[in-house]
Image: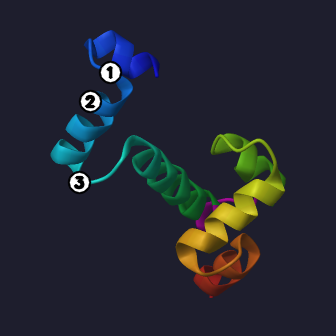
Amino acid sequence: CDLAKASGLTHAQFINCFKLELGTTPSQYVSELRTNKAKKLLTETNYKIKEIAAMCGYENEYYFSNDFKKRTMLNPLKFRHMHLL
């Protein structure tokens, strides 16, 4: 991990320090940021799911949809429709 190296810590030390400070792991933190950005884009824009996936750093829309559903219990299209009403 580049951040661990830059901070002079091992990978495990970096994760532990990060979790102590923010209460979550770095990967969980990044996933939460991506999910929040996706929610905003889904409700405030007309971008296609594929475009939102790319804007949020996902390799493809299928991985994005699975991750989004795991975190919100709704697939992106259902989330969009529920929050546009």
Tell me the residue at 72%/66% (across/down).
66
Tell me the residue at 45%/17% (across/down).
2
Compare residues 72 and 81 and report the one nearer the observer: 72
Compare residues 68 and 84 and report the one nearer the observer: 68
Mark 2 highlights which residue?
13
Compare residues 58 and 80 and report the one nearer the observer: 58
| Numbered tag placed on residue 23 in the rendering | 3
Compare residues 39 and 65 and report the one nearer the observer: 65
37 inside magenta stretch:
no
Mark 1 highlights which residue?
10
Q: The disc labelled 2 sits on which kind of residue?
A: Gln
Q: Categorize mark 1 by other alpha carbons within 10 Å: few (<14), some (14-19), many (20+).
A: some
Q: Categorize mark 3 by other alpha carbons within 10 Å: few (<14), some (14-19), many (20+).
A: few
Question: In this rendering, is residue 55 above or below 37?
Answer: above
CB under 8 Å between discs 1 and 2: yes
Tell me the residue at 46%/22% (across/down).
1
Which element carries disc 2, helix, strand or loop? helix
Which element carries disc 3, helix, strand or loop? loop
Q: The disc labelled 3 sits on which kind of residue?
A: Gly
- First reached walking from the N terminus: tag 1 or tag 3: 1
x, y percent for residue 14? 29, 29
Residues in magenta, as a range: 42-47
